[in-house]
Amino acid sequence: MEPTKRMTLRVLLAAAFALTAVTSHADEKKITLGFAQVGAESAWRTANTVSIKSAAKEAGINLKFSDAQQKQENQIKAIRSYIAQKVDVIAFSPVVESGWEPVLTEAKAAGIPVILTDRSIDVKDQSLYTTMIGSDFLEEGRRAGKWLEDRYRNDAGPINIVELQGTVGSAPANDRHAGLMEVIKNDPKFKIIASQSGDFTLAGGKQVMEAFVKTYGKQMNVVYAHNDDMALGAIQAMEEAGMKPGKDVSVVSFDATHGGFQAMVAGKINVDVECSPLLGPQLMTAVKDLVAGKQLPKRIVTNETVFPQSVAAQIMPQRKY
Ligand code: AHR
């Protein structure tokens, strides 16, 4: 072979070798994350799913995603399948707090680290998960309670509260109730006269509220809804019954979604306690750190605030979900 041709061939071979090396290196490095989502029950959850999917793409993480349709057994199945697929990290937002020991023990035995996002779990063995990223729901409940205390400071009462609870046994339902109780328990003018789950959905909130309106009517002073979707359902039920939500009855809600803000601007929700669903970027950073062998804090708390109706119109254009 002529020396110039031999030279060209060598250069081509070297380039092909370098390309193969780079490609296989990139393949080797791609992290696989298995994420078991609660479902699609609320506007909050939809925004949370978008945040996780887009952050994974941005971070170059291979995401395996499943939707449990608000059923713990579906989440357990999804986690077992991620264990069988030998993913690098498992993350999930637990539908309820209890019942996770068996499947998380299996993940631990397989050497796959687990990250909790959004909702916490109730386990004795804290080594079953690495970190928990999300809101402090107890503090959210306290914030709502403090708003109620202020609103009714000069009112002798009684202040009758009807509560629309989230999914039974879930961390936000348990803690938003407990946080409120912590604040109002020593003031006998506040009374929870009824409490029922609307499963965090608009339809559920509306259905429960229709029954409350029939039973309690004008006795109700406050609707304490554990999320915006249920608050919006309750507003529909009250309006259909000829009531003026936000005026005849104070409406306290959680999440601070676009829908919640629109209802505040319209004067129908009085206060919205923020709960941010935008957890994707923090989760991807945690996944990368974990795979790189870094130690993570056991709890990463989301920064949040409270939006009273008076600031809603000004803040609404900046809201991202
Ligand atoms: O776990 C977060 C809660 O779940 C949100 O407040 C609610 O909207 C969602 O469905």
Image: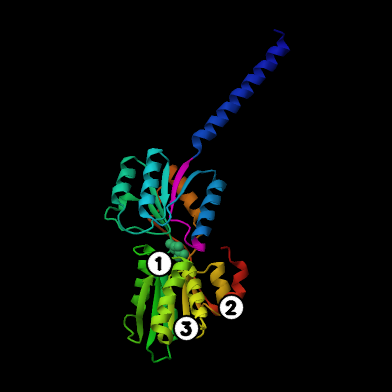
Marks 1/2: CA–CA distance: 24 Å
Residue 42: x, y in percent? 49, 62
Kindly identify which residue carries mark 3. Answer: 249
Can residue 278 be seen here? The reply is no
The residue type indicated by label 2 comes to Ala
Task: State left or right for residue 275 relative to residue 58.
Answer: left
Check contact, mark 3 vs mark 1: CB within 8 A. no
Picture quarter with ligand 1: bottom left
Whether the magenta-drawn stretch holds residue 40 is answered as: yes
What crowding class fits label 3: few (fewer than 14 Cα within 10 Å), some (14-19), or many (20 or more)? many
**Ligand 1 within 8 Å, label 1 CB:** yes
Kindly identify which residue carries mark 2. Answer: 266
Task: State left or right for residue 151 relative to residue 100.
Answer: right
Of residue 196 and residue 264, the one placed in the foreground of this image is: 196
Comes first in the chain, label 1 or label 2:
1
Describe the element under mark 1 as helix, strand or loop: loop
Which corner quadrant holds the N terminus? top right
Of residue 30 and residue 38, the one placed in the foreground of this image is: 38
The residue type indicated by label 3 comes to Val
Comes first in the chain, label 3 or label 1:
1
Kindly identify which residue carries mark 1. Answer: 166
